[in-house]
Image (tube, helix red, strand yellow):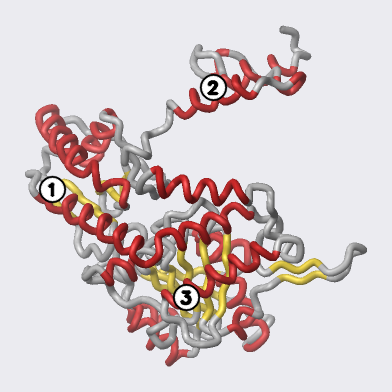
Amino acid sequence: MSKSDPVSDIGGAEELGGRPSIVSARMPWIHDGRPWEDIRADLIALKSEDYDWRGGRIPIYVYYDDDELLSVSREAYNLYFSENALGRNAFPSLVRMEEDLVKWSLALFNAPAGADGSFTSGGTESIFLALKTARTQFRATVSKSIRPAVVLPRTAHPAFDKAAYCLEIDVVRVDVGTDLRVDVDRLEAAIDDRTLMVVGSAPCYPYGVYDSISTLGKIARARGVWFHVDACLGGFLAPFARDEGFSVPEFDFSIPGVTSLSADLHKHGFCARGSSVVLYRSASIKVHQAFRFDDWPRGTYSTETFLGSRPGGSVASAWAVSQYLGRAGYRRLARKTMEAKLRLVRGVESITGLQVLYPSDLSIVLYRSVDSCVDINAVGDCLTEQGWFVGRSREPMALHFAVNAVHAPVVERYLSDLERSVKQVRASGKTGRRNDLTY
């Protein structure tokens, strides 16, 4: 190939250490296109390098029970594959479904009469919108000249920093106490005239524990600041786990002082990716969320959420799955998840040299090594060699497992491989690689 050839410009076999690059090998499609059968075969071949999520080999990213539920989500999504939720007048069906999902979520989280919310693309957008809405209200009622700040636990999700960076809001992170929950005295001391919001996690991702939401609610009310509860991870698990008799801390609008709440349907709600809600105690608060622009020839452009074009499939999937499961179905999945977690905890505790990190309020399990001859990261490496995708925690050095229904059938297999890995590391004395990547 000559240097002018667009394929050779992409790169050759050297890209992948001597193995032909799929990108360069397949680039002829930019000229003539390719048959779908060939493309489909390539897609399947590419997936062969991924971890087996159906087999419960991934402790994060995918929430799955069985192919029957998956087919409901997928078919509903495909029925609305081309519809665009930006076009509210063109697709009133999507508007109705979003309204149903918001009303159901408000009821689930004990919101008062007059509450409102929005369907969003995920936790990051829900958090962004809560901060944006709080900032707009702050500018309207407190000051337009003060650069505001959000006060949150060190364990709060990085999405808050991401949103704050875009919105020019300062972030004040507060350490947690020995119980791994935010130190409420330090958090209260960090509140000042610039504070537009305080945050509590229900639960936080690093440790799987709930901050003291009721205490934070009292502080927020006394100080007159917005209080957001991030329930993105466990929001659509906790109420149903409580129905099944599991102890779950209170975290929702039943607590005075909670102003807004975010929860992801595409996690324990088992809906298609791109499904979340942000909810407000009052519709008068939500007014500050929308964006409206008039100064262009086409006319008024107005969106309730951050995105413009939005996939109708995500809305349809969430609407269909929530109706298909109902409260009974979600209770079944919650019990399946929580019982799997308990089996995992008991199994880890039975392995010499390992220790489960407590407290553990919902579905996340952390465990570390208490044996100087067992490097926990080396244990993680051994698990990786046996086909498990391993979540790793840095503070403390531990392995991290976010349980959902997909893991119920494989807990014993995981524990068997874990015990084998611990023995291998103890016998070899090897150390493992430290992984600082959160995702």
Q: Could you tell whether 92 is left or right of 184 in the image?
A: right
Marks 1 & 3, CB-CB < 8 Å contact? no
Amino acid type assigned to the residue bearing label 1 in the image: Gly
Marks 2 & 3, CB-CB < 8 Å contact? no
State which tag comes first along the sequence, 2 or 1: 2
Amino acid type assigned to the residue bearing label 2 in the image: Ala
Nearer to us: label 2 or label 1? 2
- Whole-angstrom CA distance, mark 2 to mark 3, is 46 Å
Q: For the residue labelled by badge 3, is the local secondary structure a helix, a strand or a loop? A: strand
* Residue 312 x/y as whole percent: 63, 55
Image quarter hosting the N terminus: top right
Nearer to us: label 1 or label 3? 1
* Residue 26 x/y as whole percent: 63, 19
Residue placed at 55% from the left, 70% from the top?
100
Residue placed at 80% from the left, 69% from the top?
293
Task: Tell me, yes or no, if residue 293 can be seen here.
Answer: yes
Question: Picture quarter containing residue 204?
Answer: bottom left
Marks 2 & 1, CB-CB < 8 Å contact? no
Amino acid type assigned to the residue bearing label 3 in the image: His
Near mark 1 (Cα within 10 A), the count class, few <14, some 14-19 or many ≥20, is some
Per the image, the residue denoted by label 2 is 41
Of residues 131 and 297, which is closer to you in this image? 297
Residue placed at 10% from the left, 29% from the top?
427
* Residue 388 x/y as whole percent: 30, 36
Per the image, the residue denoted by label 1 is 347
Q: Could you tell whether 285 is left or right of 388 in the image?
A: right
From this viewpoint, which residue is outermost toward the top? 1
Per the image, the residue denoted by label 3 is 228
Mark number displayed over residue 259: none
State which tag comes first along the sequence, 2 or 3: 2
